[in-house]
Image: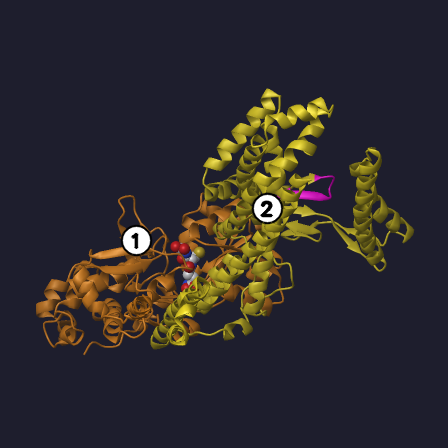
Amino acid sequence: MSAEHATAKSASFFNNPRNRALIYQALLLFGLGFFFYSIVSNALANMEARGIKSGFGFLFTASGFDILMSLVPYDATSTYGRTFLVGLLNTILVSIIGIILATLLGFVMGVAYFSNNWLVKRLSVVYVEIFRNIPLLLQVFFWYFAVLAALPSARESMAIGEVIFLNVRGLFLPDLIGESGSSIVYASIGVAVVAIYMMRRWAKKRQDDTGEQFPILWVGLGIFFGLPLLTALVTGLPFYWEFPELKGFNFRGGITVIPELMALTIALAVYTGAFIAEAVRAGVQSVPHGQTEAARSLGLKESRIMSLIIVPQAMRVIVPLLNSEYQSLVKNSTLATAIGYPDLFTVFVGTSLNQTGQAIEIVFMTMAVYFAINMTISFGMNRFNSAVALVERK
Amino acid sequence: MFKFSSILAAGLAVGVSVGAQAGTLEDVKKRGSVSCGVSTGLAGFSQKDEKGAWSGLDVDVCKAVAAAVLGDSSKVQYKPLTAKERFTALQSGEIDLLSRNTTWTHTRDTSLGLNFAGVNYYDGQGFMVSNKLGVKSALELDGAAACIQAGTTTELNLADYFRANGMKYTAVTFDTSDQTRSGFESGRCDVLTSDQSQLYAIRIGLKDPDAAVVLPEVISKEPLGPVVRQGDDAWFNIVKWSMSALIEAEFLGVDSANVDKMKDEGKPGQKRLLGTEGDAGEKLGLSADWAYNIVKQVGNYGESFERNVGMDSPLKIARGLNAQWNQGGILYSPPVR
Ligand SMILES: N[C@@H](CCC(=O)N[C@@H](CS)C(=O)NCC(=O)O)C(=O)O
């Protein structure tokens, strides 16, 4: 093959280290390809011989079962392909909420470690030590079976102002439903975001030129809430509230946050948050103390030293660690199956695999999904990493 | 160097393909025990006591096979499996036989590479609700939340039933029967649905069994029976006839108390079953006393039924459909001859 061909052509070609490396790589690739090909074709032949069905045709047949929660319309007449989509979206949902909460918690707790307040510092230490050292599955069970399952029944719900209800079936919130004209209000949110971005650039430039600071946060918040509110008022409030109401067995209407989702996100956020707090602590400690002293001698306020001097430099250490924490969180979200949250793993590798028996196809598709999600996270975090690395060079 | 790596690759590939199935019977004899897949714990069907000993109607099928093949009903390795795990465990060869309240359906029989060796319990899906709800019929369940177990026929029947009756529901799906029960107890759902026999079993496991009622509706057919891998007909026959022997023994009036007497003094049919006449055991590749060992050590189907789920058990299930065909039921074993 290619190796023999190359040798025949010229010895110097083969002696070239780059070519040699390429050939080795190609051979390895070929070997691996052949290896996996044999595994797959063997498995298929064996399955055929044992009368086990194979192929991806099942994705187009009706599943015949219902799913507790889905972000797209789904019922028992939907296909297995749609089951896959429902599971995928549920996995993405729990991952995104989990990552946001874990990051907030982790940064707050990580920074709290450096507080001069004894209690706050202790709190941070205790939090990290407890939640980092208890197996995640146990924490998931704790939140689901010990905390949320102990809530009162639907008829005896805890209520906040008769519009928000919490019971063993979940958290029931009022839903804001848009009528015609509401799309203008949604558009104004986009406009607000762009405006804030431009304001930030302008404020930064002004500070570079004149040294004057601009209250970005407050003005930003003002724009973010003010503009849509103003638009809503002008368009005559094209919204109405849909309140959850106890009808028959359950609450209907409004938004339902199922306890399985709550338990899983809380557990993931609290667990991963502990690791992130550690990462933040390590990052902050990696910034030499001289930086703090230099900032102090410049007359910066203590609170600004942390946010302007220390954290940006600490980010270089924190971001790579965050990357792996986020990836773990996504993988850990498969623990959903222990409490019946309908994530991809539960509905696809669990129920669908069992109902169709098509293990190879289903496991393969699911592995590909988790691989893709984690590659995406890695890609995003690497870009973020180069962004924070630039800060240093200025 | 290159040759070496491709030889390695080829060698690995060949290694993978040597998965050809050896005879299960030989494996079992060599190992000295039958590996039997059961539930993770379901009163009356397969449950473990404090000492770690398994008992139940499904467990008795495992024991019958061990008695027939190895002459000792205690030579069974039990593998507790959830509904989701059971078929993979059988396909992969982790167990020799699955006896875990498994419904015989067309899909399972035709596309999973499995064979059902008969029916050891005729069941149907029912509903259990809390007394407090005051519900008298399943048709009053519109809008209810239902606790079910993942990977079961229950999931599918439930969807069919509510759709056919134009009712809505929320499916709350759990992995094991314990989780399903605690979901029901905590009030996560209004109704627990499963095969009726299992509802009775779950009900006696509740903190307060009297607080729950089983509704009258039966919404499906659930013929439950033992399962083996497709492609090993000799083993398939052994499991099929071990289970039939339990039923046939009851039909012929042979039980664990009179089996020794019947063996020598019984009618021709009884003697044929017990191996003193004919060569039924030999044709299965087993010893002549295969069925004798089953009845002697496990009892006949009727004994097993009463002991595990019937009037001598906490479940108190009536024979109903599971009586012999000449006693008002539909239990009917092909003749041993
Ligand atoms: N017969 C049905 C249902 C079987 C089933 O798994 N039932 C549950 C009742 S909640 C059970 O026995 N669980 C016991 C366990 O998970 O170990 C089937 O074959 O799909």
Image colour for chain A is yellow
Label 2 with label 1: CB-CB less than 8 Å: no
Label 2 secondary element: helix
Answer with the quadrant where ligand 1 appears in the image: bottom left
Q: Nearer the viewer, residue A93 or A149?
A: A93
Measured in 3D between alpha carbons, the distance from the residue under mark 2 to the one under mark 1, in whole angstroms, is 52 Å
- Relative to A66, B154 lies left or right: left
Quickly name the residue at label 2.
Answer: A98
Are labels 2 and 1 assigned to the same chain?
no
Write the residue at 50% across / 46% down: B185
Q: Is residue B123 visible?
A: no
Q: Nearer the viewer, residue B65 or A388?
A: A388
Extent of the magenta region: A160-168
x then y, percent, for residue A180: 84, 60
- Relative to B201, A315 lies left or right: right
Quickly name the residue at label 1.
Answer: B312
Image colour for chain B is orange
Label 1 CB less than 8 angstroms from ligand 1: no
Query: What amino acid type should be assigned to the residue bearing mark 1?
Result: Asp
- Relative to B144, A26 lies left or right: left
